[in-house]
Amino acid sequence: MEKDLAGLMQAIGRRARAAASKLALADSAQKNQALAAAAARIDEARQAILDANGQDMQAAQAKGLSAAMLDRLKLDHERVRAMSQSIADIMELPDPIGQTMEEWTRPNGLRIKRVRVPLGVIGIIYESRPNVTADASALCLKSGNAVILRGGSESFHSSTAIHACMAAGLEAAGLPAGAIQMVPTTSRDAVGILLSRMQEFVDVIVPRGGKNLISRVQSDARVPVIGHLEGLCHVYVHKSSDAKMARDVVLNAKMRRTGICGAAETLLIDRECLQTHWPLIADALVEAGCELRGDEEICSLDGRVSAAQAADWDTEYLDAVLAVKAVADVTEAIEHIGLHGSGHTEAIIANETVAVSRFQNELDSAIILHNASTQFADGGEFGMGAEIGIATGRIHARGPVGAEQLTSYKYLVAGAGQTRP
């Protein structure tokens, strides 16, 4: 069985490598034709996708998955429509391939250009969110990359139905089927093979999922990885902030969707504004169904808050739970985030420019917002059409990973017979 699985994965890799060579030469019109056809097919197949998702939801409920995980997995008419629209938005983006990033002329007359090229073959490993199948496929196609998708077992039927729509788009545009492939098994061994035994076919791995998945990928991968460990996102309410704005932003950052990586997990609030700001914020959170876990000072102010444990400052809840800590000032807020953050997304609510400047300059997270919800940590909201994930590393890509971030570059040098002395 292991030999058969290895053979299957090798065949997928060979098809992807062959497709990548052709896709790198495809023009914008052909790629956009495939995207348009895929988006239309998703609309046409909406009920079939929902039926497949129903199978996944039923199995997930039987396994006792958490409410947050079920929310990530669930599709409805609006979410399917959003997938189709996301593909259409990606189609409208400028084609990054062939773009001149910079050009200059040397004193000897050599003309040098740096131009964007695809990465090649991208392996994407993800868990329960089936819309990643559409977003990742569309972004890779737009950026001229072949992709090997390995979705989670929880979303297998949903992802298979969505992949069929993407494959139909390729066929309609005359592009090779190997450009978008999905690993047709839920075997965990397939992940191991993709990570460590396909270096000749796969150029980069992009994981999207929980801490255990990301850790395994970063530990076992034999090719470069673009990924993040987890979204330990913070909102810091400074004493200069408007109380109603702080309430609205904190409520949205935590409760709009608790199961996404941009959801706030810790609230830091200046001690000086606890009396004016905390009642508004706490009332809104409790009314929305959020469980609050606070430090000793917060607990003494509000009987609805349970005592936070040390682990709470390092936990990505992905649920309606928020850790709350009172701080002296922006210095203490920065120190806390530096100790407990994951480098994903932080927000400051403030009207004092010095505090905002320090927060933005001294923290090194991938995304730092001022007077806005952490839930804007999203490629679509950044105007990228969609994203594969939020990268928290410092090499190659950081923040939302869209089509442009899935490219590398090469140098084109033009001369007129120059020789080097």
Image (cartoon, helix red, strand yellow):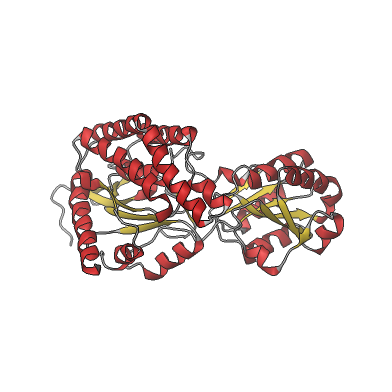
Please state which of residues 237 and 66 is positioned toward the viewer in this rendering.
66
Q: Residue furthest left?
A: 417
Residue 311, image x, y percentages:
66, 67
Horizontal side of 375 relative to 21 (left or right) equals right
Residue 150 is situated, as x and y percent measured from the top left of the image, at 34, 55
Q: Is residue 87 left or right of residue 193?
A: right
Q: x, y percentage for residue 206?
A: 38, 56
Name the quarter where the C terminus is drawn.
bottom left
Residue 337 position (above or below residue 368):
below
Q: Residue at x 39, y 33 (%)?
A: 46
Q: Quadrant of residue 48?
A: top left
Q: Which of 265 and 350 lies nearest the eye of the viewer?
A: 265
Please name the residue shown 26% across and 36% down the image: 168
Closest to the observer, 324 or 363 = 324
On the rendered image, what quadrant is the N terminus found in?
bottom left
Measuring from the top left, give residue 414's x and y in whole percent: 20, 47
Q: Is residue 311 visible?
A: yes
Residue 259 position (above or below residue 8):
above
Horizontal side of residue 341 vs 273, given as left or right:
left
- The reply to whether residue 93 is visible in this rendering is no
Which quadrant would residue 341 be assigned to in this image? bottom right
Determine the residue positioned at 85% across, 45% down: 276
